[in-house]
Amino acid sequence: MDIYVSRSKFKEMTLKISCQSIAEKGVAEGVRLGNKNYVITGSITGNGGYISVWGYEIVPPSLYRSSLRPLTYSEHNRAVGEGERKSGYDGMLIKVDGKKMVMVGESITFDPIKESTQLALF
């Protein structure tokens, strides 16, 4: 799924890419969009800048509804390695802005809205 966002929201997302901090410490910075919260886990770059970023919706454990039990990064990867869970972030328990959250569903791609250049009139 692709979601198009304003250039300012896209810039905020690029500053909060959290893949490394999730792997190292189990923490991430959240991004609010509409009435949902997300963490950004990766990006594509080219031509000197970001082209798109991707991430996952996050919810508090009390709102998490899935057959997957929330697991920390290391527990999750152990379960993947043992064939008990598919690879990805779905069901991963992390801390976002100091609060426990669960990453939900499939990866979502965020793209900046293409803004046209207005020509100056003389």
Image (cartoon, rainbow, N blue to C red):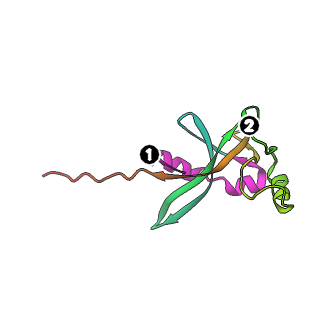
Q: Label 1: which residue?
A: 6
Q: Residue at x 76, y 36 (%)?
A: 61
Rendering quarter of residue 96: top right
Tell me the amino acid under the disc marked 1: Ser
Does residue 47 appear left or right of residue 118 in this picture?
A: right
Q: Residue at x 22, y 53 (%)?
A: 119
Does residue 9 appear left or right of residue 121 in this picture?
A: right
| Rendered location of residue 87, percent (x, y) | 74, 59
Q: Residues within 10 Å of mark 1 (few under 14, many from 20)?
A: some
| Rendered location of residue 100, percent (x, y) | 76, 38
| Rendered location of residue 22, percent (x, y) | 73, 52
Taking the view exactly as shown, the residue that stands out farthest to the bottom is: 47
Mark drawn on residue 85: none
Rendering quarter of residue 98: top right
Does residue 82 appear left or right of residue 86 in this picture?
A: right
Q: Is residue 21 magenta?
A: yes
